Image: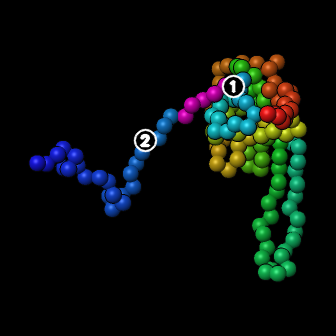
Amino acid sequence: MATRNANRRRPSAADGPVKTPMRKPVFVNVEQLTPGTSGHNLTVKVLNSTTVLEKKPRNTTSSLTGFRRPPLNTRIAECLVGDETGTILFTARNEQVDVMKPETTVILRNAKIDMFKGSMRLGVDKWGRIEETKPADFTVKEDNNLSLVEYELVSVEE
């Protein structure tokens, strides 16, 4: 007696890659960000951008192999970004500095929270993405800056 499941064939590697449907991104507000979290998707306006570091490459070669690394400029800028719930400092690195211009609206995908001197900084690493988008219609709540809140690491004794 044949069962229903006997007639069904399981997908194998020979059938090709199995496409799983991509899930829709979940967007959060700035006030929902907490220390040590990652994977955030946000739509924010850039309020201002301040260059913190602009370093020219050194002209060095390795004495062992003679291999010369391509020269890379290192640029870091701190940008104040926000939405209708609050603001936070965003650390832009290298090519990201060009995208983060004041008065632009950007979508940050897979953003993470870094801690710097006890306060939160938003950042996007190589696994994330920054895209410029059409201007948003919200007004930024500038009096709720999450980067001004200082956190302290407390050890718990049991």
Indicate the colouring scheme: rainbow
- Residue at image location 88% in from the left, 54% down from the top: 55
Q: Is residue 113 above or below residue 139?
A: below
Please name the amino acid that badge 2 sits on: Pro
Q: Nearer the viewer, mark 1 or mark 2?
A: 1
Q: Residue furthest left?
A: 1
Judge whether residue 132 can be spotted in this image. Answer: no
- Residue at image location 70% in from the left, 43% down from the top: 124
Q: Principal SS element in the magenta part?
A: loop
Please name the amino acid that badge 1 sits on: Gln
| Circle 1 residue | 32
- Residue at image location 69% in from the left, 25% down from the top: 32
Where on the picture, by quarter, is residue 115?
top right
Q: How many marks?
A: 2
Q: Assign a secondary structure to mark 2.
A: loop
- Residue at image location 78% in from the left, 29% down from the top: 88
Q: Assign a secondary structure to mark 1.
A: helix
Residue 62 placement, left or right of 40 = right
Task: From the top left corner, tell me how far across and down residue 125 is, in percent.
Answer: 70, 47
Magenta region: which residues? Answer: 25-29
Q: Is residue 3 above or below residue 67?
A: above
| Circle 2 residue | 21
Would you say residue 9 sits in the magenta stretch? Answer: no
Image quarter of the C terminus: top right
Judge whether residue 68 can be spotted in this image. Answer: yes
**Dot label at residue 116:** none
Spatial CA distance of label 1 from label 2 is: 27 Å
Q: Nearer the viewer, residue 10 or 103?
A: 10
Q: Is residue 16 above or below residue 45?
A: below
Q: Nearer the viewer, residue 15 or 78?
A: 15
Specify few, some or many for label 1: CA neighbours under 10 Å numbering under 14, 14-19, or 20 or more. few
